[in-house]
Amino acid sequence: MLEVKGIQNGIVIDHIKAGNGLKIFNKLLSEHMDTPVVLLMNVDSKALGKKDIIKLADVFDIDLDILGLIDHNITVNVVRDSKITDKRKANIPEEVTGLFNCINPRCITNSDAYAVPKFKLYEMNGTAEYICSYCEEITKYRL
Amino acid sequence: MSQVRHLIEPEDFTLEELMQLVDTGLSIFENPSQYRKVCDGKIMASLFFEPSTRTKLSFDSAMMRLGGQVLGFSDANTSSTAKGESLADTIKVVNDYSDLIVMRHPKEGAPKLATHFATIPVINGGDGGHQHPTQTLTDLITIKRFKGRLDNMKIGFCGDLKFGRTVHSLIRTLARFGNKEFYLISPDELTLPVSLKRQLEKQGVKLIEVRYLEDVVEELDMLYMTRIQKERFFNEEDYVRLKNTYILNRDKIRTAKEDLIILHPLPRVNEIAIEVDTDPRAAYFEQSKMGVYVRMALICKLLEVGPYARG
C-alpha cells in the first residue's frame, strides 16, 4: 500500500473521478507549482470505486466553479495545522464567464477579444450544459 | 430619457409591448402624415456590416418618414472595420454621432456586444443565423393586419430553418403568443437548430417535422417561406443541391385554405414561383411594406417620441 503523508497547511481536492486528476493538475495547477503538490491516482474509494486526490501545500484558494464544471462530486478540504478546518463542495455554477469557449464558430465570442464567453446553466443531463449569452448555442464543458 | 432600451431579441419586449408596437405600426400605416415630424433633429446610425436591402432601406425610410436623418454604411469594407477596427471602438464612436443605432453583423451575438459600449438604443438588424427581431415585428404586423390575431393558428415554416434567422425569431415569438404547434417543412440538412428545438419543446411547443409541403398545406393558416441562402453554406455543392428543393407554385397551394396567408421575409430567389404573386393569399410584398410602419413605431418607442413621448 502506497502511503502519502498528510499536509500541514493547504487544501486537499478529494473525490475526483479516476482519470480526471491529471487533467485538473495540467489545466489548473501550473500557477501553484512553486509549492509542494501531490497527485494521487486510482486510490480506492467507497463511493467511487477508484478516485484521484490532489494535495496542495500552502494554498487556500481554488476556483470551485471550474472544479464543479469538471466534476460536481469533488470536495475541497482546507487544512490548517494538520486539521481540516473547512469542507467545501464544488458546485455546478449557474453562470460561467471566460472559462471555456462557445462551440458555435459564428459566435462573436470566437472572433472578438471584447466578447468574453459568458454562459448560463441550461440543463444537467449527466454533464452540465450551458447556453451562450451571446448566440444561445448550447455548449457542454469538456475537460 | 429613462433607462436605455435595446432590441436585440424579441424577448427584450413583453407581449404587451410587442402588441402595442404592432398596433402603433397599424395606426401609422393608416395615418402616416401625423408622424412626419416626430423625429425632427434625431439621427439614426445605420451600420450594416453585411449586405441588406429591405432591412436597411426600410429602416432608413422609416426614420426619414418620421422627419429624422440617417448616417452610416452598408458594407463593412467602406468602414474602418476594413482597417481592423474592433466593433467596440466603432460603436463607441458612432454612439456620439447619433441618437439610435441599427446594426447588422455576420457574427452571432455582435449586437448584444454592441450594447455594452452604447449609451443610446441599439437595434439588431440581423446577426448571422441567430436573430432578426425587426423582421419578427414586420411579420407580426402583417399577420395582425391580414388575420386579425396573433394566436390560435396553424403555422408552417418552409425552407432553410437551420440558418434562417427570421424563422428563429418568429417561431419563438409566436410560441409566446400561445401558438403551440408548428409544422417545420425542410430538408434534413436544414432543420431547425437542436438548441432552439429544445428550448421550444421545453415550453410545451409541439414541432411536427415533415419533408414535403403538400403533406400539410391544407392544414395551414399561415405559410412562412424562406430562401435557401447561399452565404450560409460552407460549399457550393450543397447549396446547388438544396436550393431548388422547396419551390412554392400554384399547384402546391391548390388545396390550401382560402384565407391562408403566404409570407416570406424576402429576398426571394426562386422558392416562390412568380405565378403565386397574383394569388390573393400571397402577402409577402404587403409584408415588406408593413415593415416600414412597424419600424417607425419601434424608432418612436426607443427614442420615446411621438406616440411614446413621456409626460
Image: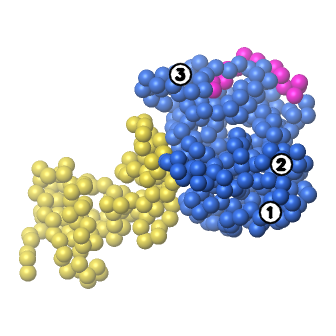
Chain colours: A yellow, B blue
Residue bounds of the magenta highlight: B32-47
> Which residue corresponds to mark 2?
B276
Please tell me in which quadrant of the rendered image residue B47 appears.
top right
- Chain of the residue under the numbered disc 1 shown in the image: B
Q: For residue B300, say whether it is visible.
A: no
Question: Which label was assigned to residue B78?
Answer: 3
Query: Circle 2 sits in a helix, a strand or a loop, which is it?
Result: helix
Q: In the image, is residue A134 above or below residue B241?
A: above
Name the side, left or right, on which B122 lies relative to B16. Answer: left
The residue shown at (34%, 57%) is: A66
> Which residue corresponds to mark 1?
B217
For marks 3 and 1, give the CA distance: 44 Å
Question: Which label was assigned to residue B86?
Answer: none
Q: Residues within 10 Å of mark 3 (few under 14, many from 20)?
A: few
Quadrant containing the N terminus of chain B in the rendered view: top right
Q: Residues within 10 Å of mark 2 (few under 14, many from 20)?
A: some
Magenta segment includes A87: no
Name which residue type carries label 3: Thr
Is B72 in front, or is B75? B75
- Marked residue nearer the N-terminal end (3 or 1): 3
Q: In the image, is residue A2 above or below residue B158?
A: below
- Marked residue nearer the N-terminal end (2 or 1): 1
Is A4 in front, or is A138? A138
Query: Circle 1 sits in a helix, a strand or a loop, which is it?
Result: helix
Q: For residue B192, say whether it is visible.
A: yes
Residue B146 image point, x, y percent: 88, 48
The residue shown at (17%, 59%) is: A56
- Chain of the residue under the numbered disc 2 shown in the image: B
Query: Circle 3 sits in a helix, a strand or a loop, which is it?
Result: helix
